[in-house]
Image (cartoon, rainbow, N blue to C red):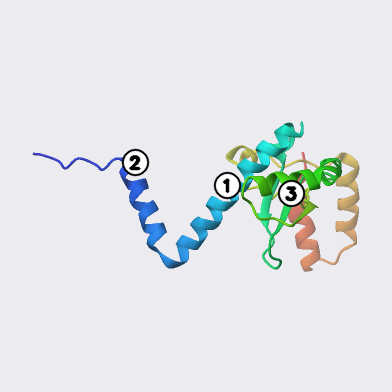
Amino acid sequence: MKSTPKPTSKKLAHDWMDYIRESKGLSSILVQTEELARIKSALNQILTELSLGHLTQKIESGWNSTAKNELFLLVPNASIAARLQQTLPSIINGLRKNGVLCTVIKVRLKPAPPLWQVTSKTADQSMKKPKVFSSAAIASWQSLLEKLTPGSELRKAVEKLLQGKTR
């Protein structure tokens, strides 16, 4: 039984590129992406010439959607922002020489990532035994339990709590 050969990924990638170029909505996204890649490359070259090449991996660039010919640079901290602010005229001239029409560059700090992170329980975490109360905590809970009225919802909850947390 003969099987048909699978198309190569290079051919598929080329077909997708043709589709993106022909599609009305996607072609504009492709053009913007290619433009940003060209700006990033030119910016890397300019920063290297200004002895700031070590900063290129820390800078994200993009066009301001509300202002014409206004580029913004997102940086992780204020010291990099200050270094870039000092060299903005040279960066603008360098971009102009590379064919990028840019009249204003604004340097902004990236928003800090959240200090907390939502994570799911792993198998190891869910299999751990629950922590037990210290003897002082158990005595305190039992004292409270004695003061609660029998049959109350709070008493049932405290009893259930003590069942799982005693040694």
* Figure quadrant of the N terminus: top left
Picture mark count: 3
Number of other residues with Cα within 10 Å of mark 2, as a class: few under 14, some 14 to 19, many 20 or more: few
What percent of the width, then of the height, locates residue 60? 68, 47
Note whether residue 41 is visible: yes
* Front residue of this view, candidates 5 and 103: 103
Identify the amino acid type marked 2. Answer: Lys
CB atoms of marks 1 and 3 within 8 Å: no
Q: CA distance from mark 2 to mark 3?
A: 37 Å
Q: Earlier in the sequence, mark 1 or mark 3?
A: 1
Q: Earlier in the sequence, mark 2 or mark 3?
A: 2
Q: Residue at x 80, y 65 (%)?
A: 154
Q: Left or right of 7: which side holds 51?
A: right
* Front residue of this view, candidates 7 and 126: 7
Q: Earlier in the sequence, mark 2 or mark 1?
A: 2
* Front residue of this view, candidates 27 and 140: 27
Which residue in the protein does label 1 denote?
A: 37
Element type at mark 3: helix
Q: CA distance from mark 1 to mark 3?
A: 17 Å
Q: Residue at x 91, y 42 (%)?
A: 136
Identify the amino acid type marked 3. Answer: Ile
Which residue in the protein does label 3 denote?
A: 92
Identify the amino acid type marked 1. Answer: Ala
Element type at mark 2: helix
* Residue closest to the far front: 97
Q: Residue at x 85, y 67 (%)?
A: 149
Q: Residue at x 50, y 62 (%)?
A: 28
What percent of the width, then of the height, locates residue 61? 68, 50
Q: Left or right of 165: which side holds 141?
A: right
Judged by depth in the image, the label closer to the viewer, 1 or 3, is: 3
* Figure quadrant of the C terminus: top right
Which residue in the protein does label 2 denote?
A: 10
